[in-house]
Image: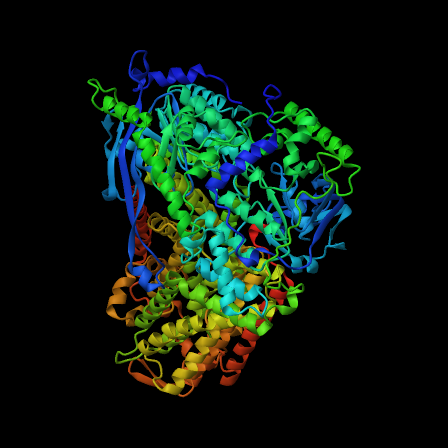
């Protein structure tokens, strides 16, 4: 390690570096206004932070159950408490960019979680986090911190430009004009080098869209759009190619120079990226190995006896130096010891500085990164209190609605598949119960048909809706957490946005069957029948929405949906006679939308008709009423069916709303 | 880190059919790529942007790429995303999609390979690891070895596996389970090494790896590349694409190729690279990673038009400088030389004496069973899911009655309807949950030429038989006796047989479609649709078959539900007598009273069923072999794409 001690003066090297770099990377003039932040300057301070994580609580409850662990044993395991951050001190001001580097499991992500008040199962043992001398709270965080997460949450069917435009509409204050919003979106697209794919849809794992690196950049763009005072990024460069990564960090450093506070965590930065940092925090298993200006890091470690070898990246070298090597037990011991020693040394060294940063010389006390107040005159005034100026609930609702409609509408293949599915079902059942032959349908077949109409289609609907809600959930969770919009506008937008699809679906499904089966051919009966169908399919939809919002995983939701549907199916009055149900299923049948649909359709169809039945030579006249009686479906007048169905829909929707409101469903990747 | 040298491997390699090429004085193995170009045509915009959608543009994926590499060398292909790295690997290994847009030649030892020779010559490691999650490292390597090598002795296979594990320093985790996203197992780097080890079992002379270091942390990534270079130096050719390599690796590569926009900007050894770029006027700064520096230098900046033009012209300068350089002319000379050598060395095939097809199926069966038997929850779920459903029905139905007026017939029909439609559905759920990972592995391993895809299918089919029998036995015992179906042991036997058949048919049907459709979700909804359609058309429980339109009547003969329901109806109603309401009720009062004898119900609705009883059972069971054959055919078709 020490044999290559040919130490180069770093300033010299970096000077040469910048010169060559400039020929590769065009340092653009800061012409776009939004790169400056004109709110009051921010200070982020972390004092003596000790943070402990309960690893057991990071396993979701349903997985614990799946592993046959009972709820009462969950809390008791003391080994699961792990200290991930120890004695951390930190102070960053607007205009500075702090990079947190270190190997995996070094506590980087935990630190960002603590700062943004999203501590999942963690506990602050001592110390505190201050933003502008106020302890950080979720409200405060929401107001002034933009947090770019490691994974991407975007609607798959919108193009890049549309994605950003919708965010711009939701997130930028009211006084922005449409053209200003568009301008800013274009700025961000240009800045993140997304021009090439601006009109390509975003896509996801299943759907081909833009590449993974481009998706990362869109996620970053989403946060850059609203121009916050503090920008926190978790591993922004992972998955990006080096060139884009470099450009991204240049962008970030320019953002920082525009009087903004930038905090980013990085696995192991490349040498050219490392040069761009102002401040560096080197963490190793929760300990601080170094915290100070980037360009003094080499000097600091050289003084401690660890010079950086030539032709090697100081960041790589020192991260490796402080990382815990778990290959063998001896190596692990040794590297742990080294990391501890380095951390203790550092604590000793910075004891005397009030901002806990190590500095090369005593006299050089002033910030190296002077906050250069831009002297551009017509800076767009970013309001200090963003929340008041954000679009109101009604506006949010319309934006969300149009976003949802365009996302759904773009998904042509799914729409076509659903439409095709409905048509196929309809034609199949229709031809199966083809009623235009001279005898028409028998009583038994008509009964079966009326039940099947209502019972077959909701099943596919439930599966589709549950799957869709789960795919959108990650984004919903983070939008709500980030305060981009509130639950109510989303709820109404979701419900209203799905209505057209629903109506078309029911029309495609309902009309051919009715005609093919030759049910009572007058408009009144048809409309009554159609309305029932509309209601029953919508109840299935509402139930699926509720189930999806209630439970944490797709499998569980699909399972519960299945169970509920099968209960309603069995207690619907067709499969098992309503009379022979015992008490529990009897009550289930009271809320079974399939039963009320069946009852309604039977009454519409049979009440006024008289059937002829031949048995040998004798022909009976059977009034339709008798049929409904036999099935015990005449207990209530017709209008009750409509009321009950509507009631069922409303209660499912209410339950859905309550679940959205009070159960914060993370997506599986967040656990 | 890895063992420096393992003589066992070298020796066993030289016994293979390629051994001759390695004796001293022989020419080394080589790959020459000459003037390879590849284009695809794609639409400019999405479908809703109609004007853009109509336009198509031709994208140049590879443009006139040439290089030459010999055994004992490791080559790293660098470049930004979209620069054609992976396409180049695909071109070498003959895996490109549309052959008609492909120009240029790839020679291995001066031979042009035939289509089927590619897979026997190259070992190709894609970006994702496909490994069975519940096997230990040693087991998964042993099974791969068994599939590759003719049944030598088990001790020689063990020796071989041990040697490979030592070479890749996997010995200390030999008995650890591989794991998956929700099962704890070995780490990502170890998993990659297991994949490499599986490839090494075949003693390939040429290894291609697509982004082997992605997703690994730096330390592990370094170790992996170091390992690969050691492998290369033992007389192999190793070519890998790599994303952001670290500076320590710079000297490890014998050749470094930089790709940009489909063009090879440079290809040569590290020292040549530094001097080449210095000559062009860009020397690498001291404290910086040369890989990064040169890749940045050759990137095209698309942020704005001017930058794009400027950077693009810089790349063009490099390309022309490279083409005029001495390095490039040496490459061309080397290619010509191999092409026109009098005695061309033979193509270095991988070692392959795979056992015969039947043994392969047995090995696959053992592997599948071993893997799935470790999944405790999975097994419990599979055995009990039918029962779960049975509990559900029993909860609603409690016990069948004998009074027609209280729905004796209706309830029985409902129960039979459930017993016909639910078992195929649970079978489908099994197949959709368990088979896709196996399918992914068979896709991968059949590309490596280990076995054919349908063999994996057959192994899976054999493996699920006992599970189906037990699961259906539990279900039918429960439902038959709690609900009170016809109390007779032989009738129960028939009931069990019918439910078992429909359960298996459901699973087989799903396998057929899984062979044709990739996405399991689509398969799932397709099967649900197919099943409900079959139930309505075939069973006659919800629609009198006699009154159906003729084409549908015909169609009903092709549904297995027709046979299962007929058998079950006869099985239950034959010889059963019901009461009807009180004493004074008459047929006029309640039309259902017509059916106070079970036989009446059968005659009325299934006049054919009585005489066809045995035939129905036989036809139902005939569905199973037929579906197995169709499934095998669908996987044979899958082989070609």
Relative to residue A171, is residue A254 depicted above or below?
above
Residue B385 seen by the camera: yes
Residue A302 falls left or right of residue B282: right
- Considering the image in quadrants, where does the N terminus of chain A appear? top right
Q: What percent of the width, then of the height, locates residue A67?
A: 60, 45
Res B15 quadrant in image: top left
* Foreground residue among B105 and B372: B105
Q: Give the residue displayed 67% in from the left and 36% down from the top.
A: A285
* Foreground residue among A11 and B299: A11
Q: What percent of the width, then of the height, locates residue A278?
A: 63, 42
Q: How many marks?
A: 0
Q: What percent of the width, then of the height, locates residue A246?
A: 51, 43
Residue B193 falls left or right of residue B631: right
* Foreground residue among A572 and A3: A3
Q: What percent of the width, then of the height, locates residue B600?
A: 36, 70
Res A103 quadrant in image: top right
Instruction: In the displayed orientation, state which residue is furthest to the top.
Output: B24
Res A292 quadrant in image: top right
Residue B482 seen by the camera: no
């Amino acid at each position: 390690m020490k044999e290559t001690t040919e130490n180069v003066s770093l300033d010299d090297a970096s000077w040469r570096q910048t010169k060559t770099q400039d020929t590769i990377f065009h340092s653009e003039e800061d012409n776009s206004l939004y790169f400056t932040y004109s709110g009051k300057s921010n200070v982020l301070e972390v004092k003596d932070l000790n943070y402990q994580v309960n690893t057991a609580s990071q396993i979701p409850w349903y997985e614990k159950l799946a592993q046959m662990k009972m709820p009462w044993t969950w809390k008791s395991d003391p080994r699961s408490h792990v200290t991930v951050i120890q004695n951390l001190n930190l102070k960053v001001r607007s205009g500075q960019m702090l990079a947190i580097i270190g190997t995996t499991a070094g506590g980087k992500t935990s630190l960002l979680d603590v700062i943004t008040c999203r501590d999942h199962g963690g506990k602050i043992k001592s110390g505190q986090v201050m933003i502008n001398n106020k302890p950080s709270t979720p409200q405060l965080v929401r107001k002034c911190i933009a947090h770019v997460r490691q994974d991407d949450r975007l609607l798959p069917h919108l193009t890049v430009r549309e994605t950003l435009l919708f965010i711009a509409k939701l997130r930028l204050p009211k006084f922005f004009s449409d053209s200003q919003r568009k301008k800013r979106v274009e700025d961000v697209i240009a800045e993140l080098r997304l021009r090439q794919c601006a009109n390509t849809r975003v896509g996801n794992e299943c759907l081909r869209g833009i590449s993974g690196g481009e998706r990362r950049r869109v996620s970053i763009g989403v946060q850059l759009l609203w121009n916050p005072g503090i920008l926190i990024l978790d591993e922004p460069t992972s998955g990006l190619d080096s060139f884009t990564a470099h450009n991204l960090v240049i962008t970030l450093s320019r953002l920082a120079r525009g009087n903004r506070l930038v905090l980013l965590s990085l696995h192991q930065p490349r040498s050219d990226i490392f040069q761009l940092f102002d401040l560096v925090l080197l963490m190793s298993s929760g300990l601080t190995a170094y915290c100070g200006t980037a360009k003094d890091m080499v000097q600091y470690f050289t003084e401690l006896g660890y010079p950086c070898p030539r032709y090697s990246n100081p960041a790589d070298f020192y991260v490796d130096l402080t990382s815990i090597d778990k290959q063998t037990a001896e190596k692990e011991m040794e590297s742990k010891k080294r990391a501890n020693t380095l951390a203790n040394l550092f604590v000793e060294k910075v004891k005397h500085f009030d901002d806990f940063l190590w500095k090369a010389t005593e006299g050089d006390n002033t910030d190296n990164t002077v906050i250069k107040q831009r002297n551009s005159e017509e800076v767009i005034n970013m309001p200090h209190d963003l929340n008041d100026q954000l679009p109101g609930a009604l506006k949010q609702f319309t934006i969300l609605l149009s976003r949802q409609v365009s996302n759904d509408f773009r998904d042509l293949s799914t729409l076509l598949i659903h439409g095709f599915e409905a048509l196929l079902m309809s034609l199949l059942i229709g031809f199966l119960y083809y009623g235009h032959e001279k005898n028409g349908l028998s009583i038994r077949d008509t009964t079966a048909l009326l039940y099947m109409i209502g019972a077959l289609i909701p099943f596919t609907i439930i599966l589709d809706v549950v799957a869709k809600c789960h795919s959108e959930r990650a984004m919903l969770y983070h939008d709500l957490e980030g305060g981009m919009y509130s639950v109510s506008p989303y709820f109404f937008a979701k419900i209203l946005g799905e209505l057209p699809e629903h109506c078309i679906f029911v029309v495609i499904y309902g009309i051919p069957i009715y005609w093919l089966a030759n049910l009572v051919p007058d408009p009144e009966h048809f409309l009554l029948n159609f309305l029932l169908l509309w209601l029953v399919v919508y109840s299935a939809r509402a139930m699926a929405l509720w189930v999806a919002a209630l439970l944490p995983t797709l499998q569980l939701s699909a399972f519960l949906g299945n169970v509920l549907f099968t209960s309603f199916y069995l207690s619907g009055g067709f499969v098992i006679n309503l009379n022979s149900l015992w008490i529990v299923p009897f009550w289930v049948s009271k809320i079974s939308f399939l039963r009320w649909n069946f009852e309604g359709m039977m009454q519409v169809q049979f009440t006024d008709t008289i059937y002829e039945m031949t048995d040998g030579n004798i022909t009976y006249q059977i009034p339709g009423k008798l049929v409904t009686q036999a099935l015990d479906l005449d207990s209530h007048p017709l209008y009750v069916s409509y009321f009950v169905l509507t009631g069922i829909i409303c209660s499912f929707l209410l339950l859905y709303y309550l679940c959205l409101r009070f159960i914060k469903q993370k997506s599986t990747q967040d656990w | 880190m890895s063992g420096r040298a393992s003589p066992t491997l070298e020796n066993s390699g030289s016994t293979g059919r390629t051994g001759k090429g390695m004796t001293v004085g022989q020419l080394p193995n080589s790959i020459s790529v000459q003037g390879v170009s590849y284009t695809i045509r794609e639409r400019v915009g999405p479908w809703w942007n109609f004007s853009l959608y109509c336009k198509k543009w031709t994208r140049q994926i590879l443009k006139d790429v040439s290089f030459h590499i010999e055994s004992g060398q490791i080559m790293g292909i660098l470049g930004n995303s979209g620069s054609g790295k992976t396409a180049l690997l695909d071109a070498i290994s003959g895996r490109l999609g549309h052959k008609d847009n492909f120009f240029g030649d790839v020679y291995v030892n001066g031979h042009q390979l035939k289509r089927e020779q590619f897979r026997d010559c190259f070992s190709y490691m894609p970006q994702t690891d496909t490994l069975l999650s519940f096997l230990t490292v040693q087991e998964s390597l042993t099974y791969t070895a068994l599939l590759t090598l003719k049944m030598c002795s088990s001790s020689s296979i063990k020796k071989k596996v041990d040697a490979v594990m030592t070479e890749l320093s996997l010995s200390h985790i030999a008995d650890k389970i591989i794991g998956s996203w929700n099962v704890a197992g070995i780490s990502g780097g170890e998993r990659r090494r297991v994949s490499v080890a599986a490839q090494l079992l075949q003693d390939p002379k040429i290894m291609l790896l697509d982004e082997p270091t992605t997703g690994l942390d730096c330390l592990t990534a370094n170790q992996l590349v170091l390992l690969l270079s050691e492998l290369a130096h033992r007389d192999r050719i190793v070519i890998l694409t790599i994303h952001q390599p670290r500076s320590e690796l710079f000297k490890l590569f014998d050749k470094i190729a930089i790709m940009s926009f489909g063009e090879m900007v440079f290809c040569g050894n590290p020292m040549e690279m530094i001097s080449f770029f210095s000559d062009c006027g860009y020397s690498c700064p001291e404290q910086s990673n040369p890989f990064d520096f040169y890749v940045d230098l050759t990137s095209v900046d698309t942020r704005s038009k001017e930058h794009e033009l400027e950077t693009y012209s810089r790349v063009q300068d490099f390309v022309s400088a490279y083409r005029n350089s001495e390095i490039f002319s040496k490459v061309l000379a080397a290619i010509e030389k191999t092409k026109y050598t009098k005695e061309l060395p033979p193509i270095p095939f991988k070692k392959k004496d795979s056992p015969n097809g039947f043994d392969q199926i047995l090995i696959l069966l053992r592997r599948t069973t071993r893997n799935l038997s470790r999944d405790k929850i999975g097994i419990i779920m599979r055995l009990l899911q039918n029962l779960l459903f049975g509990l559900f029905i029993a909860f609603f139905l409690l016990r069948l009655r004998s009074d027609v007026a209280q729905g004796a017939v209706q309830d029985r029909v409902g129960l039979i309807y459930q017993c016909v439609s639910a078992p195929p559905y649970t079978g489908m759920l099994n197949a959709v949950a368990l088979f896709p990972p196996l399918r992914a592995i068979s896709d991968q391993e059949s590309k490596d030429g280990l076995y054919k895809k349908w063999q994996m299918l057959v192994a899976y089919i054999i493996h699920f038989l006992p599970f189906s029998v037990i699961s259906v036995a539990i279900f039918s015992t429960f439902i038959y006796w709690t609900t009170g179906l016809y109390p007779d042991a032989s009738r129960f036997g028939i009931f069990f047989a019918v439910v078992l058949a429909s359960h298996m048919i459901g699973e087989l049907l799903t396998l057929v479609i899984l062979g044709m459709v990739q996405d399991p979700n689509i398969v799932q909804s397709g099967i649900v649709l197919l099943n409900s359609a079959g139930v309505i058309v075939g069973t006659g429980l919800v629609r009198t078959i006699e009154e159906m339109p003729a084409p549908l009547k015909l169609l009903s003969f092709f549904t297995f539900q027709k046979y299962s329901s007929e058998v079950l109806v006869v099985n239950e109603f034959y010889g059963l007598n019901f009461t009807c309401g009180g004493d004074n009720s008459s047929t006029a009062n309640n039309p259902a009273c017509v059916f106070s004898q079970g036989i009446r119900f059968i005659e009325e609705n299934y006049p054919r069923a009585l005489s066809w009883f045995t035939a129905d059972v036989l036809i139902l069971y005939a569905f199973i072999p037929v579906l197995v054959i169709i499934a095998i055919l669908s996987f044979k078709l899958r082989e070609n794409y």
